[in-house]
């Protein structure tokens, strides 16, 4: 066998089972159970849908028009399913040879149904309550439609690779020619449109055309239409809020002290702020920022380089308050993200203060002044600084060459903030003493 062929060892297979895939190829080569091309097609099909299958976590894989059954056996060998059913009226001798060659790699029950597709598939889907995935590596256009329709009727996920497209009336073929689109691609799009209209979440997967010219796979999950997508988004948002509300132990009296730009300005000017409130604010900021400003900062912070894919579109998440003076008193700060624009980065809100821990919300303005100043230094390649904010986790992303700048800036900004608060307090105290002196003199 050609180890450099698509789907052969050394290709884009699972990283952990790399030796497993090599052993599977070696076993096929020794037993000559199936041809190299058939093995390549089965491996290519499996590799292009394995991520979708992993999310689905099927217990049973049903290989329709499976023939030798290599595709179903690959799912079992890689642990993507616990049992397999192969449906094909013609059971080739290569199936038994392949099972024997892979007997040490494939566990779990395997059944072979030699009844016609129209009879076998509905009964298999109806009589099994376990999670199932129906796969078909080579299904002619009319068979692909039948397989998909049976899966839709029984609410079962499927991965089907249609081949030999036919348009008896010729309308789609004429439209494809008019639009200068190849006919097989037009048939795939038409089928996906039909499925989407039936509230089926479908995606197009493909593998190397050198393996087979029929290399497009439709992966569908019936019943996973707009409503389920909305439900998944709601669940993700719920989990995000749950993480933001992780219990803390900071002083509750500091909650919401600085929740808007107006409150920050008020605190800086010392207007309508008594000495106790100013002391509370200063102490709250000191306590919240102490984990990332102390002498043992490198013991508290873990610095590691993050993969580029974690920073798609150069979007960088930070915690802070909006850098604008146009906020109304009702609006507040929160979690923000820097989004790239034509001229730099734009700060956008994602989660408001009300959903955050009180001790985090109390320090948002100070953190905003620190983090918003880093926007011009941000770059596609970033590092993550993991630390704690009070008793809660703090994560801020900055460019790797600005780490030392960040440390010095934290010290400088905190000192400046403390000095500003002290100045405001002294001004208020002097104003109070002046009025007391005037009243006493009078």
Image (cartoon, grey):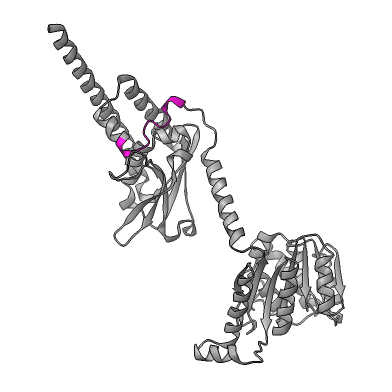
Q: Position of residue 223 (x, y in %)?
A: 67, 64
Count all numbered tags in the image, as a single digit. Answer: 0
Q: Residue at x 77, y 60 (%)?
A: 59
Tell me where residue 265 sits by quadrant: top left
Q: Position of residue 90 (x, y in %)?
A: 85, 82
- Front residue of 26 and 34: 34
Q: Is residue 10 visible?
A: no
Q: Residue at x 87, y 78 (%)?
A: 115
Q: Residue at x 42, y 55 (%)?
A: 315
- Front residue of 328 and 132: 328
- Front residue of 184 and 21: 184
Query: Is the residue 112 above or below the residue 269 in the image?
Result: below
Image quarter of the N terminus? bottom right
Q: Which residues are magenta?
A: 251-262
Tell me where residue 129 sits by quadrant: bottom right
Q: Position of residue 18 (x, y in %)?
A: 67, 65
Q: Is residue 262 visible?
A: yes
327 with respect to 292 (left or right): left
Check if residue 258 falls in the magenta segment. yes
Q: Position of residue 386 (x, y in %)?
A: 47, 42
439 with respect to 356 (left or right): left
Check if residue 351 falls in the magenta segment. no
Tell me where residue 132 sits by quadrant: bottom right
Query: Is the residue 172 above or below the residue 20 in the image?
Result: below
């Amino acid at each position: 066998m050609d180890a450099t062929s698509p789907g052969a060892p050394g290709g884009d297979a699972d990283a952990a089972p790399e030796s497993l895939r090599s052993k599977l190829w070696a076993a096929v080569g020794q037993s000559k159970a199936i041809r190299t091309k058939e093995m390549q097609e089965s491996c290519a099909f499996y590799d292009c849908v394995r991520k979708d299958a992993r999310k689905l976590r099927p217990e049973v894989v049903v290989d329709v028009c499976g023939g030798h059954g290599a595709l179903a056996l690959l799912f079992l060998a890689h642990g993507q399913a616990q049992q397999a059913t192969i449906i094909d009226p013609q059971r080739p001798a290569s199936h038994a040879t392949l099972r024997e060659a892979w007997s040490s790699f494939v566990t779990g029950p395997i059944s072979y149904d030699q009844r016609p597709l129209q009879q076998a598939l509905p009964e298999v889907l109806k009589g099994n309550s376990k999670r199932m995935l129906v796969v078909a590596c080579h299904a002619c256009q009319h068979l692909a439609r039948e397989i998909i329709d049976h899966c839709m009727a029984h609410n079962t996920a499927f991965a089907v690779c249609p081949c030999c497209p036919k348009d008896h009336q010729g309308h789609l073929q004429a439209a494809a020619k008019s639009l200068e689109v190849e006919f097989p691609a037009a048939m795939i799009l038409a089928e996906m449109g039909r499925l989407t209209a039936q509230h089926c979440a479908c995606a197009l997967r493909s593998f190397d055309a050198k393996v087979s010219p029929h290399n497009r796979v439709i992966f569908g999950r019936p019943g996973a239409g707009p409503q389920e997508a909305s439900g998944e988004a709601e669940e993700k948002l719920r989990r995000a809020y749950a993480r933001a509300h992780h219990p803390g132990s900071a002083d509750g009296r500091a909650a919401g002290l600085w929740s808007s730009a107006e409150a920050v300005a008020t605190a800086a000017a010392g207007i309508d702020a008594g000495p106790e409130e100013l002391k509370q604010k200063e102490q709250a900021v000191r306590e919240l920022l102490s984990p990332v400003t102390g002498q043992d900062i490198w013991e508290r912070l873990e610095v590691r380089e993050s993969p580029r894919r974690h920073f798609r579109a150069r979007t960088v998440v930070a915690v802070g308050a909006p850098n604008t003076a146009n906020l109304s008193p009702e609006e507040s700060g929160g979690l923000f993200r820097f989004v790239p624009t034509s001229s730099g980065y734009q700060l956008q809100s994602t989660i408001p203060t009300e959903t955050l821990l009180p001790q985090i919300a109390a320090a948002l303005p100070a953190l905003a002044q620190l983090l918003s100043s880093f926007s011009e230094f941000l770059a596609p390649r970033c590092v993550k600084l993991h630390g704690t904010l009070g008793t809660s986790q703090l994560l801020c992303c900055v460019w790797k060459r600005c780490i030392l700048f960040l440390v010095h800036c934290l010290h400088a900004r905190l000192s400046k903030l403390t000095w500003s608060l002290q100045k405001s307090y002294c001004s208020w105290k002097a104003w109070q003493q002046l009025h007391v002196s005037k009243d006493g003199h009078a």
